[in-house]
Amino acid sequence: MTATLTVSVGAAHGRILSVAGYRPDRIVTNDELCERIDSSDEWIRERSGIIERRYAATDQSVADMAAIAAADALARAGIDPARVGMVLVASVTHPYPTPSAAAEVADRIGAVAAAAMDIAAACAGFCYGIEVANALIRTGSAEFVLVIGVEKLSDWINPDDRGTAFLFADGAGAVVLGPSDQPAIGPVVWGADGSQLDAITMTQSLIEYKNEGGPIFPALEMQGQQVFRWAVGEISKVAQQALDVAGITADDLDAFIPHQANMRITDAIVRALKLPEHVPVARDIAYTGNTSAASIPLAMQAMLDAGEIPHGGTALIIGFGAGLVFAAQVVTLP
Ligand code: UT7
């Protein structure tokens, strides 16, 4: 006889309740990086939109930054850490495959009842995490979920590689998701094109870590133009699809918060979407650099805290990167 199982039943909908960010103290200028690469402040600003970026301290880990952002996000949501059912850490720079950064962060913030796991979906990791969190809340597997995007890319870039050294940076952004009566997270549009695995890798060479005697990390290598062309061509379509499946148009948006890959990629997607002038666009890359999985929550937090976009407003978020992976959804802002 087949037994009838009891299954969990969740909330009607999930929503983002709060967002918080952590930016390391150390500001790194273009001029400082140009001591190691054949480039200039002018070229970097023009081709990427980056004016400066932040690097974590040598002894500051991915989990350190994630825990700060996560604790702040919980405080902003007014949620007791013990009520968190899952901690998801999206990162590609936690230095070892196991134990996970998520388990460490859960312990550090007092999420004693939480399951924990990492998500390796590169610059799309935060949007992947939002979809997983939403599903967990709707199926009753968790009431509250922490999604943290965090990177310490300064450990993994080759400071002598002028194709990547100026682009990537460090930081953490975290959101708390919980139950909602109203729809607040649109359907995800996501995927992965493994035929372009070689576009961004961490496997082809090793670099000596700058901290002498410290660990040796594989260097991040990127076919910049290949990624650029893919992002401008394919990701613009994904952005439009996310609006379509949510049943809204670009005119309905209060914010567009794409992964902060390159200011010119953002501009191209804005043009392709025919985004109306009144919709604020995240341009956090100028002072934060490309922080991969952390870039969307960092930009969201900055825009909300500056009063540039309304709490409770409607935002399109989209992440894309190594894999090549992508994910986009329309969300109600916390
Ligand atoms: O985070 C998610 C994944 N990553 C991305 O989305 C990044 C996507 N790619 C990019 O953002 C851009 O490809 C970069 C910003 C990385 C590079 O910009 P680009 O406009 O694609 O540069 P390019 O590689 O096409 O090079 C253009 C020129 C070349 O010179 P010639 O052949 O035209 O004379 C390069 O040698 O610029 C030269 N160049 C540089 N010059 C000064 C390349 N890198 C540099 C540099 N400084 N750092």
Image (cartoon, helix red, strand yellow):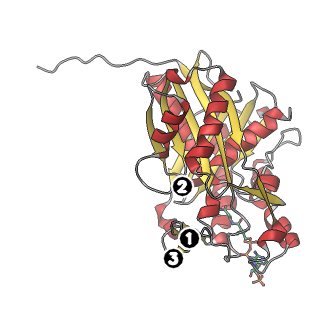
Identify the residue under disc 2.
92
**Alpha-carbon span between mark 2 and mark 1:** 12 Å
Identify the residue under disc 1.
219
Residue 18 shown left or right of residue 9 in the figure: right
Q: Which quarter of the rendering shows the C terminus?
A: top right
Which mark is first along the chain, 3 or 2?
2
Residue 122 location, x and y as percent?
A: 56, 54
Identify the residue under disc 3.
205
Corner quadrant of residue 177: top right
Cβ–Cβ under 8 Å for marks 1 and 3: yes
Q: In which quarter of the image is ligand 1?
A: bottom right
Q: Residue at x 45, y 29 (%)?
A: 114
Residue 81 location, x and y as percent?
A: 55, 24
**Alpha-carbon span between mark 2 and mark 3:** 17 Å
Q: Which residue is drawn at 77% across and 71% down?
A: 33
Q: Which quarter of the rendering shows the N terminus?
A: top left
What is the three-letter code of the residue carrying label 1? Answer: Ala
Which mark is first along the chain, 1 or 2?
2
Q: In this view of the protein, which residue sits in the foreground, 265 or 112?
A: 112
Asked if disc 1 is less than 8 Å from ligand 1, the answer is no
Could you tell me if residue 35 is visible in this image?
A: yes
Work out whether 185 lies above or below 220.
above
Could you tell me if residue 247 is visible in this image?
A: no
Q: In this view of the protein, which residue sits in the foreground, 257 or 142?
A: 142
What is the three-letter code of the residue carrying label 3? Answer: Ser
Q: In this view of the protein, which residue sits in the foreground, 272 or 39?
A: 39
Asked if disc 2 is less than 8 Å from ligand 1, the answer is no
